[in-house]
Image: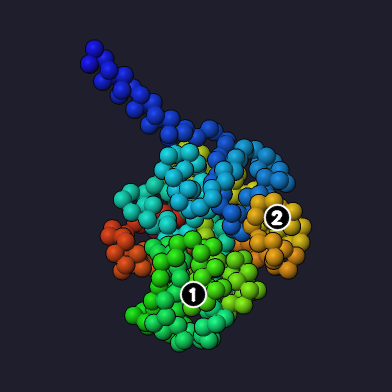
Amino acid sequence: MRGLKVILLLLYIGAVTLGGCRKAEAGALRIAVLPILDALPLYVAKAEGYFAAHGIKVELIPAASAAERDQLLQAGQIDGFITDLVALALYNRESPQVVAVRYAMVPTADFPQFRILAAAQSGITTVEGLRGVPIGVSEGTVVEYVTHRLLEAEGLPGEAVVTLAVPKIADRMALLGAGELNAATLPEPLASLAMQQGAVVITDDTRHPEISCSVYAFRKIVYAQQPRTVRAFLAAIDQASAAINADKNRWNALLTEKGLVPAPLLGAYTLPDYPDAAIPTEAQFADAVTWLQATGRLTQAPAYRDSVVEVDSRR
């Protein structure tokens, strides 16, 4: 009897494990979506029928946070998602698990992706004014990486850059607005909202666009098994990005419905230019890896060729 119980327990564990790793359906993708502006092309491609026109089914799975998205990824419940190069390197720290296939968002001369802001009450107006001043960030993430690299690029030595862990963006904004935090790094469009409420821009990544980006990424096994589906997905994303860039005032209903732009900014915030088909460079990926190694968060360096793949969506 005891042996039978052990066998049943093992069968149960096996069923749970296999159930957690959903087998990808041919021609279908499940994409995790955070409430970020980078995701607008996904919603446009779905709403305008671009995915269907390219012969694929795409289910968008809402994730409230990066932590929730990563839980879905670890459970095998999603096939793809939007992420960044710091997270990509960490996903692949032991072996290639995830592959980036396209930029999702990049800063341009007119549209930053991240801004370093000072509280209105702080009196700080320059990069030098941030020397030794704790800057609110989410530790071990692209936000902390961008903070260090931006300030170093603007002439502040690394040892003069001090960060303070404030993981939740809402907390960072509230503390900055109240003057309890003298400086913080925020993504757009929340940085614009903080500016509307009085925060002062110290610097942003429009001056150093190579530092920031987000990417579309897939589980490596999904990309290997469904290359045509991934190509069709990217073709639909390219179509959606072109449609957004051609008429930026057309998508207010989607922005409101999906909560991608704060209500106080609706009608006043200009959407960024979504990128053409391109991938991060080897130098960009290597710099994110170098930073992670310097901070002790990564020992073995993942290979660029295992982590970033150029996909021709026209095929």
- Image-quadrant location for residue 120: bottom right
Sequence-wise first label, 2 or 1: 1
Instruction: Report the side of 18 relative to 257 (left or right).
Output: left
Circle 2 is placed at which residue position? 256
Which of these two is toward me, 115 or 282?
115
- Image-quadrant location for residue 173: bottom right
Count of marks, rendered view = 2
Q: Which of marks 2 and 1 is in front?
A: 1
For label 2, the SS is helix
Crowding at dot 1, Cα within 10 Å, few <14 / some 14-19 / many 20+, comes out as few
Which numbered marker is on residue 180? Answer: 1
Q: Where is residue 37 in the image (x, y as percent from the top left)?
A: 61, 59
Question: Which amino acid does the dot numbered 2 rest on?
Answer: Thr
Q: Where is residue 45 in the image (x, y as percent from the top left)?
A: 67, 48
Question: Which amino acid does the dot numbered 1 rest on?
Answer: Glu
Which of these two is toward me, 287 or 189?
189
Residue at the (54%, 62%) spot, across then down: 170
